[in-house]
Amino acid sequence: MKIEEEARDIAEFYSFLRIETPLLEAAELYERGIGEETDVVQKEMYTLRTKGSGKLALRPEYTAAIMRSYLQHGMHRLPQPQRLYSFGPVFRHDRPQAGRYRQFYQFNLEILGGDSDAIYDAQVIIAFYKLIEELKVKPLIIQINSIGCRICRPNYRKKLVEYYRDEEICRDCERRLKVNPIRLLDCKKEVCQTAKAGVPNIFDSLCSLCRGHLKQVLEYLEEANLPYVLNHLLARGLDYYSRTVFEIFLEEAIPAGRQGNLALAGGGRYDYLAEVLGGRPTPAVGGALGVQRLIEILQTSGTAIPLRTSKPKVFLVHIGNDAKKKSLSLMEELRRANISTSNALGKDSLSAQLEAANKMGVPLALILGQREVYEGSVIIRDMENGVQEPIPMRNMVEEIKKRLRG
Ligand code: AMP
């Protein structure tokens, strides 16, 4: 499957390792992880009773299972964060129609552990965006929102409950209002649409940390030149999200009768999921892309899928915040030039990053510090003999190609 190859290449380019989880798991994992009151658990999950008296579920999504695996196998003892990807079938009970299937493939990216650095949120979004773009599906638009944290979300919930007290809503939303009012934001039922027009804006309720976090994610997206719009009604269906939530759409719905404008990919930050599953606090962010929806669009537009293969040749090292930010656009420049590149975004010490480069066995490292960003230069390091030399950033691609050839 060509999309799978492309997805794998993108995942490996951004240093994600593959993980596979069982198709069948204890239903409780998803009930607790995704949330009892969600559509996925209430209406879409296929469950079965075993001969004992256990209840199992067919995988309705990957994230809860990947977090379960992370906790169960003590992955917090490995270098943090862990970047994991998966590609496989998930199952959701639904009336089959264009863009909605009972079995479909998801490509999943998760960054687990470490801290809640906004660069990780941006990296997940960028990787999905680049994969879709690579397949010549565009123009795309990212919708993004922050749904706050344990500190600020309760205030917003109160505001929502107050607001909806006098509004006309569907039966499901009447129940949701008691257990998880944020879910009312993304109800698709006709009767709930009028009330949405005057819903209090969550941005006004975010605490300063959540605001700062969202601002940073947006800055990183801008640095990577990706188009986004803030959508304060974006809540996503699952309970485990905190702060960033996002979805990626085609900018214009594809023509008549096909699939309307359904999200191609979606995800967000889920810093509390590990605790809900009984583990230690573990910041995490991730998302999933629906493979069938991409295929449908490719078929509609008659686009052929290009092939690309890559193994890291260059490791990008950053020192300081400006360099960290700049490294996103350098990564994209290298990707466009087809120079496979790895990095340890989020690791801040020079020695930790060089060690990671060493382990990976790349021939070249690029070192970017405050001074280099300011001067528009970058240091190129031969990893075999340790010899370093500053070069102008504009000559970077040419210089790397020359050295890789030699
Ligand atoms: P979700 O986490 O529910 O937003 O799902 C992530 C992605 O999976 C969506 O953006 C879609 O591309 C895809 N997806 C979700 N549900 C279905 C479905 N029933 N059939 C096909 N693709 C789906």
Image (cartoon, rainbow, N blue to C red):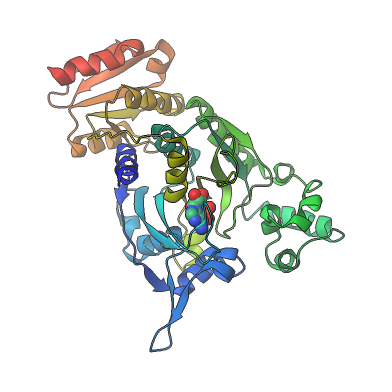
Residue 24 in percent (x, y) is at 38, 71
Q: Is residue 97 left or right of residue 374?
A: right
As drawn, which residue projects farthest toward the right?
Answer: 166
Q: Quadrant of residue 73?
A: bottom left
Q: Is residue 152 left or right of residue 330?
A: right
Q: Is residue 279 left or right of residue 240?
A: left
Residue 49 vertical placement versus 374 (above, below): below
Residue 382 in percent (x, y) is at 18, 22
Residue 93 vertical placement versus 142 (above, below): below
**Residue 16 visible in rendering:** yes
Residue 191 in percent (x, y) is at 78, 57
Which residue corresponds to the image point at 37% horizontal and 16% vertical from the top-left? Answer: 372
Q: Is residue 100 left or right of residue 404?
A: right
Which residue corresponds to the image point at 31% horizontal and 37% vertical from the top-left? Answer: 13
As drawn, which residue projects farthest toward the bottom?
Answer: 52
Which residue corresponds to the image point at 65% horizontal and 53% vertical from the top-left? Answer: 151
User: Which quadrant would the C terminus be assigned to in this image?
Assistant: top left
Which residue corresponds to the image point at 58% horizontal and 38% vertical from the top-left? Answer: 255
Q: Quadrant of residue 59?
A: bottom left
**Of residues 41 and 361, which is closer to you in this image?**
41
**Residue 113 visible in rendering:** no
**Of residues 304 and 124, which is closer to you in this image?**
304
**Of residues 36 and 118, which is closer to you in this image?**
36
Residue 355 in percent (x, y) is at 23, 37
Task: Count every numbered label the image shows and give the total.
Answer: 0
Q: Quadrant of residue 332?
A: top left
